[in-house]
Amino acid sequence: MFEIKKHYGILGIARSGVAAAQKIRELGGEVFLSDIQEAARVAGSAELMGHYECEFGGHTARLLECDELIVSPGIPLSIPIVREALKKGIKLISEIEFAYQIKAADSKIIAVTGSNGKSTTASLIHHILSRIGKASILAGNIGDAFSGYPIHKPGIEYIVLEISSFQLDLIETFKPDVSVLLNITPDHLNRYESFGHYVASKFRILENQTEQDFAILNLDDDCIRKQLSQVKAMKSFFTETSRKEQANAWMEDVFITFDDDTQLSIYDLSIKGPHNHTNAMAAILAADALIQDRPRIIKATTGFEPLSHRLEYVSTINGVAFYNDSKATNTDSVKYALQSFDKPIRIIMGGSDKGEDFSVLTESLSANAVKVYICGETADKMRQAWLGKVPLVCLPTLKDCVRQAFEESLSGDNIVLSPACASYDQFRNFEHRGESFKAMVKELRLEYEKN
């Protein structure tokens, strides 16, 4: 647990690492910061050096003098300094675990994980709680870091967290009052030894829960169903099909229906696609687990807008609509995008490789895509998976893909950036990729308006 007398080390000076350092300092503790990047490449490095003992450009043995290391989620646990710390018996925790150790006892935690849909579901839960007048914060893998809020002080009723597998890898006592496990599909296979290790990481969100806590679970997911015996919390289930045995939320025509006969029309939701219908089910069940007023919670879903870079409508040019789905960094996300449109789409794909098998998309692309436009590091791998099976073209850059897709489109077509890959081959992150895509579309619109 957190102790002022401990000497903490921060491994990775990014958003969550800086937030943890600031909180340790605020609470009177000692902290040392270390980052692999040179100081010039770390935002606010000059200010950080004015407040903390820091090192840049590599991780030295100075970290091994710390009592406990808070490891940023982007840092693989296989790097040499982490292995050395483990050999010396230095405890490693995530910023999520650190923040949980210091939070006030009066706040309730709703934590959301899954391969896809985490951000939308967590944001919708926060939206619902805020709309019904609850003091709620949204943190974790979205927005500000968990420890960036005054969580050690009373008064925050609900803490809604989006949690990644990387953040779960180093929890110890972290226990949500409500856990939401949306789905588990292959992802981050460039970091985990196997898919089984990735599944185990996701299931850690449930491991410290007791019979007094709640777990909201996807009844359609094979990985989740096979391990229900591990879940000690009270379970609620959702399904994107018609009602199944055990289901607490399911689809009836155009209605999301709940086991108390309350309903929500999908036309009252601004988020598109079957995957977002299940996200809404999960959000409503999660909020209701603690609030227990389902009609009020359903009403509070109104006004929620789609998040940026998640099937985000961008613009229409000459009858051709553009959608930014840059957050679709794995194959399952792309399947959801392909299912979200009434007519076939022109889809732009490619990026940095996360170790996925792209052939799993062949059937969906064949059924739902007019043409696939490929660029980036994975272009050759995608081409090998789909050549002769779906119409495709490989191009040098994202901009080339946008322009060629537009030139080949007819009025009424949809052009969707849904990469199925990370962005690090050409962009800083998925947000940078999405914003670049939107800028390219804006440039096209300006050109068209001049003609």
Image (cartoon, rainbow, N blue to C red):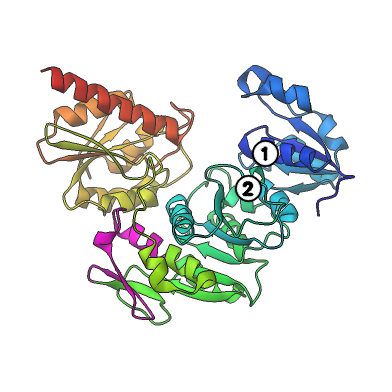
Q: How many marks?
A: 2
Label 2 amino acid?
Phe
Is 322 placed above or below 255 here? above
Quick one: 185 or 55, which is closer to the camera?
Answer: 55
State the image coordinates of residue 54 (x, y, percent, origin top left): 77, 26
Answer with left or right where residue 13 lies relative to residue 61. Answer: left
Q: Quadrant of residue 384?
A: top left
Which residue is labeled 2 in the image? 146
Label 1 amino acid?
Ala
Answer with left or right where residue 376 lies relative to residue 154. Answer: left
Q: Report the Cα–Cα distance between label 2 and label 1.
A: 8 Å
Which residue is labeled 1 in the image? 19
Residue 339 forms part of the magenta stretch: no
Classed neighbour count for the residue bearing mark 2: other residues with Cα under 10 Å, few (<14), some (14–19), many (≥20): many
Residue contact at pointers 2 and 1, CB within 8 angstroms: yes
Q: For numbered disc 2, what is the local secondary structure?
A: helix
Q: What residue appears at the point 49 percent right and 60 percent down from the top-left corner?
A: 133
Say whether disc 2 or disc 1 marks the residue closer to the N-terminus.
1
Residue 268 forms part of the magenta stretch: yes
User: Can you see residue 422?
Assistant: yes
Is 213 placed above or below 398 here? below
User: Can you see residue 57?
Assistant: no
* Magenta segment: 253-281
Q: What residue appears at the point 41 percent right and 42 percent down from the top-left corner?
A: 327
